[in-house]
Amino acid sequence: MARSAKAAGTPRADRAAKAAEPGRGGRGEGGGRGGRDGGRDGGRRAGAEVEEAVDGGLARLTPDRDRPRAWSLFLDGAPQSHVDLDDPTRLTFDYQRRLGHVIDLAAPPGRPLRVAHLGGGAFTLARYTAATRPRSTQQVVERDGALVRFVREALPLDPRARIRVRTLDAREGLAKLPDDWADVVLADVFDGARTPAHLTSTEFLTDVRRVVRAGGLYAANLTDGPPLAHLRGQIATAAAVFPELALVAEPAVLRGRRFGNAILVASGLPLPVAELTRRAASDPHSARVEHGRALIDFTGGARPVTDADAVASPAPPPSVFD
């Protein structure tokens, strides 16, 4: 991906990424079947893979041979998203499932939410929200206009869903949202396989907090590997803006044994840590939740990142995609 503020361009270091490759049919979660996504043909059915050059590289949609209307999105060979048009509640990738837990815990089941998605990818979590919380109002910000067109043509969004897509840089799109607008802000933004520097700072998170209502949730998909300097810095940065934090990741990632995904959750009010912990532990690839004093200690004295010293997240090792 050659442009900044790309969505879901992270290396999906989670083992579940391989479950979404053709013929693997990953394990899903969700309390029921969502409505079929709409469009002129109701969405592409399984068949040959489709690819197209987009602003960030070569996008490819690969069919899931085990499910007739499920697809994986790759960008320059890196797995981005998995979408099941027949069941949008089925989240295959581990990081998407953990972000789904945040959406589930943001309000009582079924209650509509206002959700801002920074990064679009294949709109997996926007589709999930629309299926589990009908009448939700959602804003998706995705800079790669060619990727948006490719995905919307091949995997149309349900026309009944209240999903608006803006082709803007994530930070520019965030700045256009009103104060206290969102119940949830999700950030899954990558330039190639790295989070852009301008989305790692206290200035960025201060604007996130402006948009999130009191008691609302912010969740970000982060990636890092040994020695976890980026991840520790991102926790310190979030702690400078939000009083309540939690981090969800597999133990091997938290111990610095391998490169992988970590979900940072933040709020102005206490988080539903007990339920988040239960859900993360019950996932097919169980994860641990760190919070409170233990999470602050995890930073190891890292300092908050500002725009003046921000750098992109580290690139993954080549073995991540093997």
Image (cartoon, grey):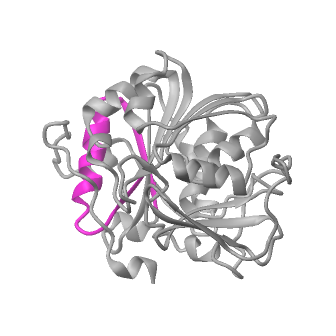
What's the residue at 38%, 62% (across, down)?
193
**In-front residue for pair 198/275:** 198
Query: Residue 196 placed where, x, y %?
Result: 31, 49
73 vs 192, left or right, is right
Q: Quadrant of the N terminus?
A: bottom left
What's the residue at 38%, 82% (across, down)?
319
Q: Is residue 240 visible?
A: no
303 vs 204, left or right, is left
Is 226 one of the magenta-colored residues? Answer: yes
What's the residue at 63%, 77% (across, down)?
21
What's the residue at 63%, 47% (across, down)?
125
115 vs 289, left or right, is right
Q: Is residue 125 above or below residue 17?
A: above
Query: Residue 134 placed where, x, y %?
Result: 79, 33
Is 215 one of the magenta-colored residues? Answer: no
**In-front residue for pair 272/32:** 32
Query: Residue 174 placed where, x, y %?
Result: 44, 29
105 vs 302, left or right, is right
